[in-house]
Image (spheres, helix red, strand yellow):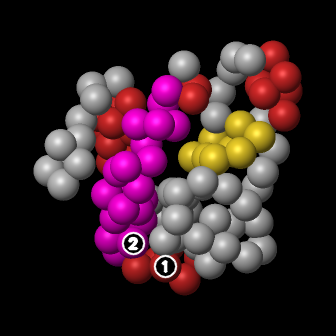
Amino acid sequence: EINEAIKKLQPRHQTHIKCYDAKGGVDNLRRLTGRHETASIHDFSAGIANRGSSIRIPRQVGEDGCGYFEDRRPASNCDPYAVTDIIVRTICLNELDETTA
């Protein structure tokens, strides 16, 4: 299920980035540089125990084959309701962007 969720998140990366900070992605542009244990704002990535990826799967989850994942892209000033909304729409409701439909 985690891998399926990640597959759904990847094509909507830029849509999520815009939603993940209060300034429509401007704050994340400064923060998500690809250095200092962050992913690049321009690329989507996922990995087990990889703090430099967009989506981090904890090592134990990778070993157990079940559990949770961390979306490391939301900024600290994000609206948690907006972030939850877009994640649910993408993963659970299979919402697509017009360009990916």
User: What span is colored magenta in the figure?
Assistant: 4-25
| Tag 1–tag 2 contact (CB < 8 Å) | yes
Q: Is residue 60 visible?
A: yes
- Determine whether, in the image, residue 79 is placed left or right of residue 95: right
- Determine whether, in the image, residue 92 is placed left or right of residue 72: left
Please report the residue visible at 48 percent of the width from the left and 30 percent of the height from the top. Answer: 5
Q: The disc labelled 2 sits on which kind of residue?
A: Gly
- Dominant secondary structure of the residues highlighted in magenta in the image: helix
Quarter of the rendering occupied by the C terminus: top left
- Determine whether, in the image, residue 26 is placed left or right of residue 47: left
Q: Is 42 drawn above or below residue 72 in the view shown?
A: below
Q: Depth check: give the residue in front, 25 or 66.
A: 66
Please report the residue visible at 31 percent of the width from the left and 57 percent of the height from the top. Answer: 15
Q: Position of residue 25 (x, y in %)?
A: 39, 72
Q: Position of residue 54 (x, y in %)?
A: 60, 54
Magenta span includes 15:
yes
Q: The disc labelled 1 sits on which kind of residue?
A: Leu
Question: Helix, strand, or loop for circle 1?
Answer: helix
Q: Report the disc number at residue 29.
A: 1
Quarter of the rendering occupied by the N terminus: top right
Q: Position of residue 14 (x, y in %)?
A: 36, 62
Write down the quadrant of residue 2 in the picture: top right
Q: Report the disc number at residue 25.
A: 2
